[in-house]
Image: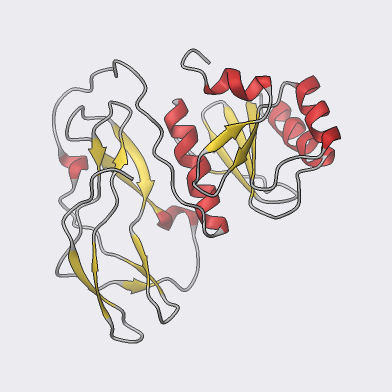
Amino acid sequence: MGRMSQSVPVRCPVCRREHLYAAPSYPCACGAPVAPPLDRTAAAAAVTHRAWDEEWLTLRCAACGRRAQWPRPELGCPCGTVLRVAVAEAHPDAASGPASPPVRRPAFQPVTIRTARDAVTAAALYLRWLGFRDIRRADQRPPSGTGLAARGMLAQVDPTVRPASLRDVECLWLTAMTESAGCVYFSLAGYTDDARVRADALGVPLFVLDLTGTPQPVNDHADALASPTG
């Protein structure tokens, strides 16, 4: 994940166990690491439900000034509670300085996949690495998995153990067509043979998410999308 930020003590509000936590850093498009500054004075909150808007925060890279959304820092306590760690108000979003274009695309920094949420986070980070902006949860829920939307692109993330089917690929393509957007599919379990044939015919890039969180291209359309000029 890159360079780690300074560690802060975090106490679980359920079992009262104290942990030492450092927020992971993520690579900006310019290559510089970006990490949320943690609030040492605020208590961590137990995550009891998931809301997409609450799981992301906007940070500004201190090196180039570019703004982007990154996952909010979370910590799993051995008691089973997921803790959302407080972020300081004065964060890199307040940094000044003009943005400069990156000289080259930095290496993708994956997120290890342990849960379905990790798979969605990995796909969102990969889309941002490809250059897509304003990534959010899609308005229309797909038949399976989770839908993501960015400017001009729809993505489907399927974290199940069932290979994506021909119908899954067609539904994604049809939804993208109605919104005049491109589309891309991320699957943890791969694709059926007829799904791959249909995706090739429709021009849908297919990626498989390995457990390291690195999307692997499955077809030529995915190779083209992942290439520096794609």
Which is nearer the eye, 197 or 59? Answer: 197
Location of residue 69 with respect to 20 vertically, above or below: above
Q: Position of residue 96 (x, y in %)?
A: 13, 32
Q: Is residue 186 left or right of residue 68?
A: right
Location of residue 113 with respect to 76 vertically, above or below: above
Q: Is residue 207 left or right of residue 41?
A: right
The residue depicted at 76 percent of the width and 44 percent of the height is 164
Which is nearer the eye, 108 or 170? Answer: 108
The residue depicted at 51 percent of the width and 39 percent of the height is 214
Task: Tell me how the rendering is colored.
Answer: secondary structure
Q: Position of residue 114 (x, y in %)?
A: 52, 59
The residue depicted at 30 percent of the width and 33 percent of the height is 28
Q: Is residue 136 left or right of residue 75?
A: right
Location of the N terminus by quadrant is: top left
Which is nearer the eye, 83 or 160? Answer: 160
The residue depicted at 44 percent of the width and 53 percent of the height is 53
Q: Quadrant of residue 224?
A: top right
Q: Quadrant of residue 110?
A: top left
Number of marks present in the image shown: 0
Q: Position of residue 143 (x, y in %)?
A: 75, 49
- The single residue placed furthest to the right in the displayed view is 194
Q: Quadrant of residue 26?
A: top left
Q: Position of residue 95 (x, y in %)?
A: 15, 37
- The single residue placed furthest to the top in the displayed view is 229
